Amino acid sequence: MNLPILSIILLAPLLAMALILFVKEENSRLIKSIALIGSGISFLGSIYLVLAYDYHSAEFRWVEQWFEVPGWGIQFILGVDGLSIPLVLLTSIIIFSGVLVSQNLKFRVKEFFALLLLLVAGAYGVLLVLDLFFFFLFYELAVIPMFLLVNIWGTGNKTYAANKLTLYLLAGSGLVLFGFFILYFVSGLNTFNLKDMLELASFSPGMQKGLFILFLIGFGTLSATWPFHTWSPDGYASAPTAASMLHAAVLKTLGAYGILRVAVALFPEGAHYWQWLMLSFGVINILYAALCVIVQKDLKYIVGYSCVSHMGIVMLGIGTLTQAGLNGAMFQMFSHGIMTALLFASVGYIYEAKKTRNLDDLKGLFKEMPKASTFFILAGLTCLGLPGLSGFVAEFLVIYATFSVSYVFGSLALLGLVLSAIYILRILKSSFWGVPSDKSTAPVGVDHNWKTALPQYILFSFLLLLGICPMILIQFISQTSIVLLRGY
Amino acid sequence: MWFYSVETFLVLASLFFFSWSLRKEVHLTLFHKLVGWAGFLVLLSALFSFDFRGVFFQEVYVMDGFSQLMKVILVLGYFITLFLAQEVKDVDGKHQPEFYLFLTTSTLGMVVLVSAKDLITLYTALELASYSLYLLIPMRSNGKGSAEASIKYILIGIAASGIMVYGFSLLFGLTQTTYLNEIAAQLPLLYQMPIFWVAFFFSLAGFFFKLSFFPFHAWTPDVYEAGNTQVIGFISTVSKIAGLSVLIRFMLLAGETAHVLDDVWVAIAIATMTIGNLSALIQKDLKRLLAYSSIAQAGYLLVGVLCISEKGISGAIYYAAAYLVMNLTAFFIISQLSKNGNNVPTSAVKGLFKRSPLLALTLLISFFALAGIPPLAGFTGKWFIFSAAVNSGYNVLALVAIFNSIISLYYYLMVVKDAYSDEGIEAGGLEPIRLKPAYQIYCYLSIAVLVVTGFFPHLFMSLTKQSIAVFF
């Protein structure tokens, strides 16, 4: 029997959400278990995908076709390939650990988990569907719940942050929407079906240049490309932990996924024409955001900006338009997702315990909360590219590819990595390993027990696994990058 | 068999309400029950007469796929309005039968309007629809400035209808006929004459007024603020859709020749959307906010219509139907929020999720649908309309429309945020709202409709495709 495995992955969180809506608010344990089961089913499904995928072929697998809108070229069609499978796995890891992280939540539990599951269903949808109408539908579905998540469960200047985040992302998606219509019109295939478009459509050079820049900026806004990145640190600083984990790890990756899936795959000439822009965006992202981190005092802003800086590596890797570069970019998408999620999870835990995120108040934290600090430190080390952890592999591949394209961009990117080492070590030295000041009024934190540490263990094990045997992931990716670069 | 058509049932319903209005004492509880059933019977008859086809009265009255589909949509709006108007708190008890009488005659006018193929029938039907509405606005007993607004409404309405009659007379002078088909047959000669386009535009003025397109939009916010919430819900949806159907008929009869005036259509669409959305940003009263939002929504509808393509028109019909549900639901929420039918400021939605979770969810869904957020019907409709615009080559227009809908997100989202955030709730402002079981069912139904038709648009699109097949 053929199970519709992709539909199961997509529907599990939606069904869980629908169930949660009918549970009474007081019954919060039941709500949490439903959320855990829903995300767990998707997790199992995506592990099955990873194990069963034959990475020698780059075709779309498990294609399911449900219905179509006659005359409009809209079909509900699902399918995955080597580009989407790792990201599906990433999404399911993050949502599973995100739900685990939120087990202590007490405030408006029902709505929180409903929105979180809606968000993740949107993310799955974007990765699984092969039709531009539903791609866009799920894309916005993933963006909108964040507005309420920040507004209700957020901290600090949350209304401002939520508005900024939502309006930026929707403005970006407006460009994408316009691009999709043009794509439908110019391709002449009368279909929004991406699979058909990838196989059949060809575009004139002028059109490729125009459309490529449209999608680069539209999707780039979501992946926090400079100068459209400012929503990101504000948004993440205000968002609740699980939401910022998901958003930073998965939604930003969706932006990069969109660039690869639509822009790079369909417009080779456009990509060549705008290569310099992608490289510059990448390098500026890395350097500018790294410099921003150095002056931050708030742990969440630090993570937010370092996340922007790391998305620069993805953009740089895509911009090289070489196989090594694309491999690196996709590797980075995965590794960055896990790493950022781990960072946000640790910061969230520390904030819960200490009620402060200010570096000065956290001096000497390592002695007080050794386990919680260790997770942050491990994620930080991935961030600065320590060999043996996954960050190193990604950064190595991208920098290597960049040097093969241009020495200038390569050296600048390398400088960015030095900067990231500086800011991470500075935080560790001055605050985690620092001497506590007498003025600090923060309460004494309670360290992890095995339950609260579980999501962090899950996340870290993936960082370590991929750092030691990167081939697990690369074998998925490299076949895809060959296909993506077919037209180059 | 023709006896069972929706027109007959509307006449019967208005006679029924008329007989009630003659009574000295009105037993309101019984009456309200009967109102709901009367509306339901009319809706059934509309569904029953969906397949009716024919031409009547020397070809001035036609029942084709298009008119019958639009009638179903209009009568659905009428039914929802009656159903939700079971608790009209701000109309005097003894005037209530008249209230429903005029709603019914107005709907009758609109139903005739979508079938009319002759200028005189068109005009009569439009006036029947409009005059009933003019009377409904001042009926509100506690509306501040309702006299001012109703006079404004009547004056602008009559001016628009005067311009329209002038346009009709020019058309007649040019073609010596009042039949739309015969006018359309003479188009190849006519469209080279500038005077024909003057006549064409003047003829549409009355419908522009109904749809509150740009030069005729100024009455909207004041009237919406002054009128009874249920009536305004009716005016903002049913009456707009009636205007839209006539506009579609005119445009389709003009066919390709209407493209001569593309610049004008595009300018009107852009102005309508932009003015509506920008003005809505600063509104403090929920009804005024929805007034400006409805101006903008009409602009989106025009984007679909001006393509004059199969895609554009069917997209516009889909969007109109979706708009009917989401806007009526939005007005339903306003009527539930206000205790005695008074207007409510936007801050009144604060903490709604505590007062009534179901109502808050309904508000979220209907406002998100208005904002065009997937997977709701409002999003799918916008997708259809904008993609039709790009398909017909209106790239700039589509881009402007997309960015307009992003601007509009701001004010819709702020209302939703207020409903779900628990900050700034005034003490004592948190008494729970209890919905009647019937209204709870309505909430669930409207949520289901907006989600299901949004995600599975093919269910409805095949209907519209059939219905406009007459034209293409």
Image (cartoon, helix red, strand yellow):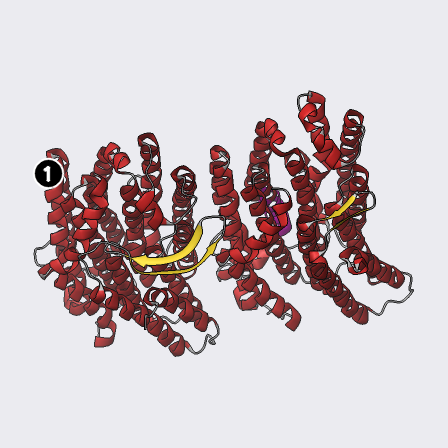
Looking at the rendering, which quadrant does residue B125 occupy? Answer: top right
A315 falls in the magenta region: no
* Quadrant showing the C terminus of chain B: top right
- Rendered residue at 76%/57% (across/down): B6
Question: Which residue position holds label 1?
Answer: A404
Question: Is residue B199 something one can see in this rendering?
Answer: yes
Closer to the camera in the image, A189 or A164 = A189
Quadrant (top left, top right, bottom left, bottom right) of the N terminus of chain B: bottom right
Q: Main secondary structure of the magenta part?
A: helix
Residue A469 in the image: above or below residue A233: below
Question: Which x, y percent locates residue B312?
Answer: 55, 42
Taking the image as shown, residue B379 lies to the left or right of residue A285, namely right
- Residue drawn at the location 34% of the way across and 74% of the way down: A37
Chain letter of the residue beneath label 1 in the structure image? A
The percent coordinates of residue B284 (x first, y second) are 59, 48
Q: Report the span colored magenta.
A: B281-297
